[in-house]
Amino acid sequence: MHTLWNALEKAKKMKWIELSHQMDNNSPYWSGIPEGSVELGNVVFDWGNPILECQIQTFKFPGQFGTHIDFPAHFVKGAAYSEEFGVTDAVFPLCVIDISEKVKKDPTYCVTADDIRAYEAENGDIPDGAFVALRTDWAASRWPDMVAMSGIAEDGSENFPSWSLEAIRYIYETRNAAANGHETFDTDGSAECARLGDLACERYVLAHNKIQIELLCNLDKLPAAGAVLIASWPNFKGATGLPCRVYAITE
């Protein structure tokens, strides 16, 4: 028996956790994207066609749709597009930072560097090349309601948790993470975005030639440390972002 086949048999006995949302024509996406940008499963060749008995569909969607990966060119003109990230850039040791209890008390809570230091005190340092995922439990309780995911208040303001710039800087500068992800629509929590007047966290990530995955799910089913995250996306050239299938393997 070959070494990799043995490893696969062992891996199959572990837990495999889906981390990406299932998408359909009603899945929410950023309001700035024009209407009509999503058209999934449009049948263009149907059963009963005398040419061939089969069905063919087309799928139209923005790059930033559903659970998706963002490449540096999304925010930085002239930076790396999708083709500059290969299959070896899609497998990571996974660290899950859980701020769900704090978010219950404050829906605009942004994870801090102190939160991450507390995580490391319990689980060990974030390893080189890690994917650092932020757990808020909003995926389980609010998806796919766009208003709920955005935390829209009576005054029309958005109120949702996510990263702070100091936390993002910590995982990339103090540690050497390869990527980050979260369950919400944006890297920047609403309070951080209001404070800085920009999506500064996302801009930082992409400006440093890192990648991120937004709208993850099922992070509550994973341990804080020890799992492996695998991401896959269509092999398109010149994409600033793409829907992706993400899953984790854990003991």
Image: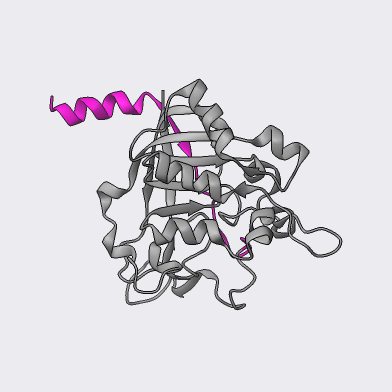
Residue 215 magenta-highlighted: no
State left or right for residue 186 relative to residue 56.
right
- Image point (41%, 30%), residue name: 227
Q: Magenta span covers which residues?
A: 1-28
- 4 lies left or right of 157: left
State which quarter of the image contains the N terminus: top left
At 30% across and 69% down in the image, what residue appears? 237
Tell me what residue is drawn at x 62 percent, y 77 percent.
Answer: 35
Horizontal and vertical percent position of residue 231: 38, 47
Q: Where does the image place residue 168, in percent across and percent down from the top left?
A: 50, 47
Q: Is residue 243 visible?
A: no
Q: Is residue 65 above or below residue 122?
A: below
Residue most toward the left?
Answer: 2
Residue at x-position 27% and y-position 61%: 84
Rendering quarter of residue 12? top left
Q: Is residue 169 left or right of residue 148?
A: left
Q: Classify the position of the C terminus by image quarter.
A: top left
Examine the rendered structure and indicate whether residue 33 appears above or below residue 87.
below
4 in relation to 164, above or below:
above
Is 17 in the magenta? yes
Q: Nearer the viewer, residue 161 or 27?
A: 161
Q: Nearer the viewer, residue 125 or 4?
A: 125
